[in-house]
Image (cartoon, helix red, strand yellow):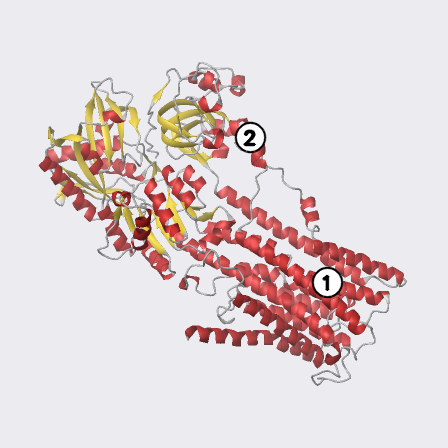
Amino acid sequence: MDASVPAEQPGQGEPGLEPSAVDPSRVDASLVDASLVDAGEIARRLEVDVTTGLSTDEAARRLAADGPNALRTVRPVPGWRKILTQFQDPLIYLLLVATAVSIGAWLIEGAAGLPVDAIVIAAIVILNAVLGFVQEARADNAVAALATMTAASSTVLRGGLLTTVPSTELVRGDLLVLGEGDSVGADARLTEATALRIAEASLTGESQSVTKDPRTLPAAVGLGDRLNMVFKATAVSEGVGRAVVTGTGMDTEVGVIATMLDSTQAHPTPLQDEISHIGKLLSMVVIAIALVVMLTIVLAQGVSTPADFVTVFLLGVSLAVAAVPEGLPAILSVILSIGVQRMARQNAVVKSLKSVETLGSASVICCDKTGTLTRNEMTIQRVLTASGRVEVTGVGYRPEGEVRHGGAPLTDPALRYETQLVLGAGSLAGNAQLAERDGEWEIQGDPTEAAFLVAAAKLEGTTVHMARFDRLGEMPFTSERKMMSTLHQERSDGSLRIFSKGAPDVLLHRCTRLQVGETIVPLDDESRRRLLADIQELSAQAFRTLGVAYSSADENTAPLDEADERDLIYAGVVGIIDPPRDEVTAAIAEAHRADVRVVMITGDHPGTAARIASDLGIDRPGATALSGADLDRLDEAGLREAVRGTSVFARVSPRHKLRIVDALQANGDIVAMTGDGVNDAPALKSADIGVAMGITGTEVTKEAAKMILVDDNFATIVAAVRAGRVILDNIKKFLRYLLSSNMGEVLTVFLGVLLAGVLGLTGASTETVVLPLLVTQILWINLVTDSGPALAMGVDPEIDDVMARPPRRITDRAIDRRMWVGIMSTGLVMAMVTLATIDLFLPGGLLPALDPGSDGLTVARTAGFTTLVFAQLFNTLNARSESTSAFHRLFVNRWLWSAILLAVLLQVAVVQLPVLQAAFGTASMDPLHWLVCVGMASLVLWVEELRKRMLRSLGRA
């Protein structure tokens, strides 16, 4: 069953738009300037009936023929070029030079055997390029997925039914249905318009919205003066209208300037800038250290042959390459992108990576009530009229229930007449549709307007009464007017009626008469006070109130304008309830625990807002709400003071929202602000995190916002704040890990060279230059222990309770002083245990040898090499928290354990397999040697555990 309500035909339009049979070839005729062509002719050329639109099949055929409605994009960089860019790095150039030098030395010395060092270095360069390419591809795929999730949509008439489609699927001949807040998805010729104003600043630079008129222009004019056209990438600021699409994709006016869009580039986030700066700083420091190490070797041990020179040079290059975290920016982008995709799966679509950083710092969440804190299933439960009140049973959009009076079915004739008038007139003064599809009732349009349709279906005879009227025009609702009206003609006698609905107090000011039964009486002061008292009573019970009025009109009324909304007859008021979402109370409590304030900003009555805020835990019981009128009486200083202690703002307009956001930011808060209407866009753009509603939000607000709530749910915002904090925590984890591990490598080589004689290295070798680690071993460590574990930490689950601490200040450094101390101390411990392991397997060192005479330099160096690799793997467990024990939630990250296991297997292979032994200068080790390596490496974990325990003790103190 499909009980779709037929689409209305509002507004003024041109006659004669019914299409006639034409040659199909005319469908693709070029429309040079549609503003000069009669709208009926446009429809005929494009073979579209403006009363029903294209059929779904025909739209699909045209889409296949013409392609998507999208602008030309920058041609994708081919894969081979992306791979080549992986080699465009100064450190890679150094490695390539080192490879050439190694081959040169091999040739000079007679080219005996294979140039193992050169082959290994070249292989590592290629593997690094492959890893970089894969990481970049993952980041690109994540960004592309976000673009798809945030794509704009348009409402069109297809097959006689209103349908929402992605704007990329619009085709020539589609009938656009435009309303306040919509983005115009394609160039189109207006067929009808009612108070339609379009913001065209993005296309023409005109700051004021342009009033549109569907009449044909007499002569060609400039783009900004084509009043009967609407253009892609502009927005509806007021009113409603319909238009036939005449151009899509590059055939639109905005397509003319597509080359400017092609050159748009994404800017790095502050965190990415900081990481890039850290990487460059470390590069300079480590290169300086490498030069010092090389000079130290030359001075301390001497260089007498070309082979010695090559060894020292390769060591310096390898040390610089291994110690500099050149992959930091790429890994950061991947982790941010993966985090954003995870948030999207939780119904929070973040449009830019920068917003993830801001989410982790949010200190105030300003949100609307309807649909965010509540279910957005508006249900009329009360109707108050001059003769009494009735209850409407049933919840949601399924039209099941009844209208009752005093606990019994409604039978009083006067009260029934008034109730039917309120529900019928309220339904007619709206644009919503109610339909049943596959057993489920769905709405198209505003939920409040749909509530009238549902309630009207519960009172027998009301829908029949509504069917007697044909709509002729509309005065749309705006947030400034807080009401709307429609003009209708009764079929039986041709008489005209104006039906209005809106905020009861606003509507009462426009009423001079009152409906009592079937009689109309003057609305005196006493009746007015009683009606206002009834409205206040409903509001005190947390009902949203909406008044309904009507009047007769004469034949000169069309087109309808604001002057006609006078001398109305007051019919009654409805009480609408939107039940709170089950999860909201807990989410608000969680936000408060994280030291994040929740502020309700709504257009509802102050009493309703304060009551719901108290019930949800936003504000204390008995707290009052500030109204828009109260805000108007405050200067900027007074407003900044008021927002410090007020959590509920009611009866506010969009300009009040903007002032509230600005005042909170002036107080130093990082503000997340929700919105759905077109007039919310300025506040969303001004907020640090503008949050648009994915279901009820207009296209304009979605474009202005930095985040979109797919489910319009407040709990999703709080979950996104938590996710943002977790992502920032994970970034610090991989920074802590990479920098401390790289520091361990640098200190191992530096101290090993300085203390070579003390450790027994000099006495164990006949070579002029003796190193604690070989060049190829250093590069192997860089390859095996960097990317995999670092990326795995980027998807680490929450270890510390991120909601148990205040928000991160936006000015906080990613790596603070305390973190630098931890990085340096861990690196020093790694170097000490590595060198101590080498010493244990060599005679003549500081420590007594475990098996004197049986181990040579190759075995000792292999043990030190293995200890350093394992120490870095133990360090992955340390780095997951600055203060929490590594054993807390030890096994929750399967990706990290997979990376650790892979690294262990590779290390065993490089030590035990003969083919890799020749390449990396290793020797097989027995179980005792492996146990010593693991035990010494684990000291990194135990020393860090002691440091964390001290930090926790100091914290408690």
Q: Which mark is residue 257?
A: 2
> Distance from label 2 to label 1 (Cα)?
49 Å
Looking at the rendered structure, the secondary structure element under dot 1 is helix
For the question of whether residue 829 can be seen, the reply is yes
For the question of whether residue 324 can be seen, the reply is no
**Residue placed at 17% from the left, 36% from the top?**
572
Q: Quadrant of residue 855?
A: bottom right
**Residue placed at 54% from the left, 20% from the top?**
28
Q: Which mark is residue 318?
A: 1
Q: Position of residue 289 (x, y in %)?
A: 69, 65
Q: Quadrant of residue 822?
A: bottom right
Q: Position of residue 863 (x, y in %)?
A: 70, 75
Task: Choose between 467 and 143: the one closer to the eye.
Answer: 143
Q: Position of residue 584 (x, y in %)?
A: 33, 54
Going from N to C along the chain, the mark reached first, 2 or 1, is 2
- Neighbor class of circle 2 (other Cα within 10 Å; few <14, some 14-19, many 20+) is few
Task: Choose between 600 and 138: the one closer to the eye.
Answer: 600
Q: Position of residue 303 (x, y in %)?
A: 83, 69
Query: For this view, does 235 lie left or right of residue 321?
Result: left
Query: For this view, does 771 lie left or right of residue 600?
Result: right
**Residue placed at 45% from the left, 19% from the top?**
43
Q: Are marks 2 and 1 in contact (CB under 8 Å)?
A: no
Could you tell me the amino acid type at mark 2? Ile
Q: Quadrant of residue 919?
A: bottom right
**Residue placed at 56% from the left, 76% from the top?**
943
Looking at the rendered structure, the secondary structure element under dot 2 is loop
Residue ranking furthest to the top? 218
